[in-house]
Image: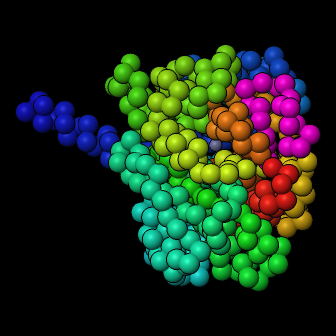
């Protein structure tokens, strides 16, 4: 009987959806010392940092739980740290972001690309889109996730023997605009650019583009069913953590300066947990195997959100790479093209310089493996909505990202990359 009660309690815990009513997002403007105070407090409550502090003059965005809101309010006031409430109530923002009760749209619906979609909806879209465009589009299973979901790549190719460009989306589960952008980019390429826009057609006649629309399927599914704020994988990879925290940050798990000091977390409950070993995450290992198996890959980009950055290696160090001049040029050209679409300003530079030191990242890994034009992007916005970016911004985000991605594809075609 006791066991039955325990099991039913565990099941209900597993099925209950995390409620973010009363959770807020603050933007604070600390100096370095004040930032240390926030960080010290944040570590004690496992604070969810949405956009991290980069140094003097910068800000930090973080989610405030009603449990400790009075404490952080006192701490901010006592230390005279100016701040504003960016998101009043996160649950309301999520409800405004997507109406889960609205009728779900199928892949053929013209409004399909204006909405966020669950993992199964995206899977259906891939099947349908590939079958409708089979002359130019193919799909590959690149592996299974920890929970057994298919990780798939969509390849857009106009012929044999091409150079290759890989675009990865959805590595961090809660960054919903990135799978949406991968899908919209594929759609734009095939239905309104190839054979119509000369510049894009020319590039596509020289470069294969591989997309991985949802590279962390378990995490993504979990954001739909259980916890909208989930970022990591869903593995129980670290035996010390079996009863506590699941998942590994799939962008701290690559075998490049993995676990170097200061660029990831050794704490399994942290959102930047590096994992028990490099490539411990099957999603990360599968992607590595897949990309390294593609001949002639000249460019790679790992698409994230938010903050509006278009960055290149290194993440592990502020030291410039030997290709820094070239990468800066590709980055500049990309953000210029992005700005020309809707006027949005993105920032370029190395990951370590633009944001902060991050170790074990995909961009550093592939750069070191010889893919010189290896990038990491952060799409919209700059924090007003953050991860709760409304659906109305999906298409504009996709349109400007498309322009930046085409700059990289062109750099592959013309031999720059
Ligand atoms: Zn991310």
User: In the rendered image, which quarter is residue 187 located in?
Assistant: bottom right
Colour approach in the figure: rainbow
Which residue is rendered at x = 47% and y = 77% of the image?
131
| Residue at 7%, 33% in the rendered image | 1
The reply, left or right, for residue 198 in relation to residue 368 is: right
Up/down of 301 relative to 273, above or below = below
Between 158 and 227, the residue placed more toward the observer is 158
Image x and y of residue 265, in percent: 58, 22
Q: Residue at x 72, y 43 (%)?
A: 371
| Nearest the eye: 260 or 354 | 260
- The answer to which image quadrant residue 324 occupies is top right
Q: Is residue 185 above or below residue 211?
A: below
Q: Is residue 179 visible?
A: no
As drawn, is 359 to the left or to the right of 280?
Answer: right
Q: Position of residue 397 (x, y in %)?
A: 73, 62
Name the residue rendered at 51%, 73% in the picture.
Answer: 130
Res 366 seen here: yes
Q: Among all residues in the image, which is located at the extreme left?
A: 1
Q: Is residue 183 above or below residue 168?
A: below
Q: Is 314 inside the magenta-drawn segment? A: yes
Q: What's the magenta region?
A: 310-328
Counting labels gives 0
Q: Is residue 11 above or below residue 137?
A: above
In reply to whether residue 204 is colored magenta, the answer given is: no
Residue 89, x across and y down, in percent = 60, 48
Quick check: which quadrant has ligand 1? top right
């Amino acid at each position: 009987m006791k066991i039955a009660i325990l099991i039913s309690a565990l099941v209900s815990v597993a099925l209950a959806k995390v409620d973010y009513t009363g959770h807020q997002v603050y933007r604070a403007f600390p100096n370095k010392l004040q930032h240390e105070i926030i960080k010290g407090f944040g570590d004690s409550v496992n604070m969810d940092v949405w956009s991290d502090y980069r140094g003097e003059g910068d800000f930090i965005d973080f989610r405030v739980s009603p449990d400790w809101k009075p404490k952080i309010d006192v701490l901010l006031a006592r230390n005279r740290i100016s701040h504003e409430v960016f998101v009043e109530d996160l649950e309301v923002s999520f409800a405004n972001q997507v109406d889960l009760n609205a009728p779900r749209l199928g892949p053929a619906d013209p409004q399909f690309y204006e909405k966020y979609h669950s993992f199964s909806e995206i899977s259906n879209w891939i099947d349908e889109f590939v079958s409708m465009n089979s002359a130019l589009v193919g799909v590959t299973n690149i592996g299974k996730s920890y929970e057994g979901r298919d990780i798939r790549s969509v390849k857009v190719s106009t012929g044999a023997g091409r150079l290759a460009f890989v675009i990865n989306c959805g590595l961090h589960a809660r960054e919903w605009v990135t799978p949406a952008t991968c899908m919209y980019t594929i759609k734009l390429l095939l239905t309104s650019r190839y054979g119509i826009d000369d510049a894009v057609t020319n590039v596509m006649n020289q470069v294969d583009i591989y997309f991985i629309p949802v590279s962390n399927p378990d995490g993504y599914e979990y954001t739909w069913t259980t916890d909208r704020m989930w970022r990591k994988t869903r593995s129980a990879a670290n035996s010390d953590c079996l009863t506590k925290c699941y998942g590994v940050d799939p962008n701290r798990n690559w075998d490049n300066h993995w676990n170097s000091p200061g660029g990831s977390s050794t704490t399994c409950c942290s959102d930047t947990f590096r994992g028990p070993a490099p490539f411990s995450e099957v999603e990360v290992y599968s992607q590595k195997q897949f990309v390294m198996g593609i001949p002639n890959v000249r460019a790679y980009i790992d698409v994230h959100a938010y903050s509006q950055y278009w960055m290149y290696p290194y993440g592990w160090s502020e030291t410039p790479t030997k290709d820094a001049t070239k990468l800066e040029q590709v980055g500049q050209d990309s953000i210029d093209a992005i700005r020309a679409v809707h006027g949005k300003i993105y920032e370029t530079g190395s990951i370590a310089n633009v944001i902060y030191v991050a170790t074990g990242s995909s961009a550093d890994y592939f750069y070191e493996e010889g893919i010189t034009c290896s990038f990491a992007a952060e799409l919209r916005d700059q924090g007003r909505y953050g991860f709760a970016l409304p659906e109305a911004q999906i298409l504009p985000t996709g349109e400007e990202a498309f322009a930046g991605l085409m700059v990289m594809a062109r750099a592959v075609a013309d031999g720059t990359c």
